[in-house]
Image: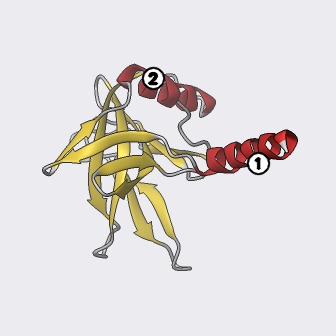
Amino acid sequence: MKMLIFLFFILFHSVSSCFAQTKIGENQNGKYVITANETDLLNAANKILKSQEISQNLTKVSIVEDFVDKTNEKYYAVKFTNDDNSTKLVSLLNLEGNNFYLLKGTKTVSCSGCRKGCDPKRYVDIDGKIEFYCSDCTWGDTKDCKKSVTQDTLEL
């Protein structure tokens, strides 16, 4: 009987850890607040940036709300930027109640190359899939914007 209880405990723990979500922040009366350790978030984001072979250092983190281009479909993301705003990295979030959780198994996307514009955005492609792109650099900033995609989810 003890062995059966032990096996049940192990099975329950394994299954529940597969579905465990990492809480990143909260919606506090319309203000999106990071509640996770920001240093841990930045370290995880910089690790992904390094895997994308981008040598910038991300220093700021926030939760953003946006819409898929030409739709009313809203999405949330945790957004990281470097000091001069020339590199941005985003990972999608799920809003449950008033809590934001990392969306497991999604792409992490970075856009880098210019300070104005070059933001990760979402659109519906020709096949009906929602994908990321990087917006154009805006007037006065002549550098090219480059997109990098990693299948890695932020790990805290």
Categorize mark 2 by other alpha carbons within 10 Å: few (<14), some (14-19), many (20+): few
Q: Which residue is mark 1?
A: 8
Q: Depth check: 128 or 2 in front? A: 2
x and y percent of residue 154 in the render? 53, 37
Categorize mark 1 by other alpha carbons within 10 Å: few (<14), some (14-19), many (20+): few
User: Closer to us: mark 1 or mark 2?
Assistant: 1
Q: Residue furthest left?
A: 29
Alpha carbons under labels 1 and 2: distance apart:
33 Å
Going by the image, does 28 lie left or right of 101? left
Going by the image, does 86 lie left or right of 43? left
Q: Residue at x 38, y 24 (%)?
A: 37
Q: Which residue is mark 2?
A: 40
x and y percent of residue 41 in the render? 43, 28
Q: Quadrant of the N terminus?
A: top right
Q: Residue at x 62, y 30 (%)?
A: 51
Q: Tell me, for residue 109, which label it has, or none.
A: none
Above or below for 115 versus 4? above
